[in-house]
Image: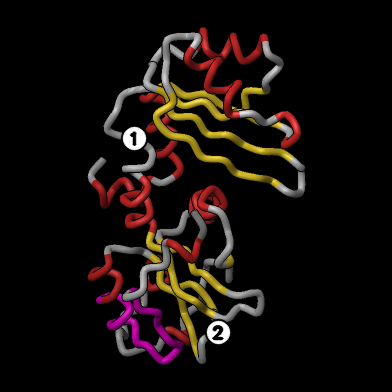
Amino acid sequence: MFAKDFIYSSFVAVKTSTTIREARELMNEWKVSHLPIVNNDILLGILNEEDLLGINDVSTPIGNVDLSTPIVSVQSDSHIFDILQFLGQYKLSICPVTSSNMQYLGSIIGIDLLQKLSPFMNIDNPGGTIILEIKPVDYTMTQIASIVESNDAHILATFIHADSDKNLLYVFLKLDKMDLAPIVQTFNRYDYIIYASYQEEEFYEELQHNYDFLMRFLNI
């Protein structure tokens, strides 16, 4: 799952000539607090709704507005984990997608992304989450599944993120068991590194902390 798979095709970027009135209307329509600024298919900036506070002349073009958000984006082949990290790091409600020369390809809407991910993450099923840090040469899903099942649990969903810089894999496991302690202990006995583990409540508290702007719109 990569950035190109989550671009919202009908989401509209604004131009430097777009007025503050038009920008506010778009933010209200899409329920976002950020908009990409694009001229001639090049990403020039990201407009934050807070940038518009205190400006009374709604006919002012946003090209005259001081922007508080840096010009940041992900590329089309960025992994879903990188996108989630990006949204959390910059506290954005949208994620611009560009080519290597900053050519604008489209945007990912944070709310839409979480809604599309929820079926794959088995959010409706109770359980816990374990993230393993593994060297690629040591990765074997057969052994991982065996360890989980030896503790009377099952894997409901899994994602794998490869960090090429560190030569590591991060294996995300959504399990159907709330009590993760015995499973974590078994992984430790097999010399697995537990990058993180969450019970259901802890996992969603973490999501809410990192993506509170999305949770507000989703009424979670």
Q: Nearer the viewer, mark 2 or mark 1?
A: 1
Q: Depth check: 160 or 70 in front?
A: 160
Q: Is residue 43 left or right of residue 188?
A: left
Residue type (three-letter) at the residue carrying disc 1? Asn
In the picture of the structure, the residue carrying the numbered disc 2 is 42
Q: Depth check: 17 or 60 in front?
A: 17
Callout 1: 10 Å neighbours few (<14), some, many (20+)?
some
| Magenta-drawn stretch, dominant element (helix, strand or loop) | loop
Give the mark count. 2
Which range of residues does the magenta coloring cover?
Answer: 11-25
Confirm whether residue 31 shows in the render: yes
In the picture of the structure, the residue carrying the numbered disc 1 is 122
* Residue drawn at the location 55% of the way across and 15% of the way down: 147
Callout 2: 10 Å neighbours few (<14), some, many (20+)?
some
20 inside magenta stretch: yes
* Residue drawn at the location 67% of the way across and 31% of the way down: 139
Name the element at disc 1: loop
Tell me the distance, in whole angstroms, between the alpha carbons under discs 2 and 1. 37 Å
Q: Depth check: 134 or 209 in front?
A: 134
In the depicted structure, whether residue 164 falls above or below residue 145: below
The location of residue 26, given as percent across then percent down, is: 28, 75
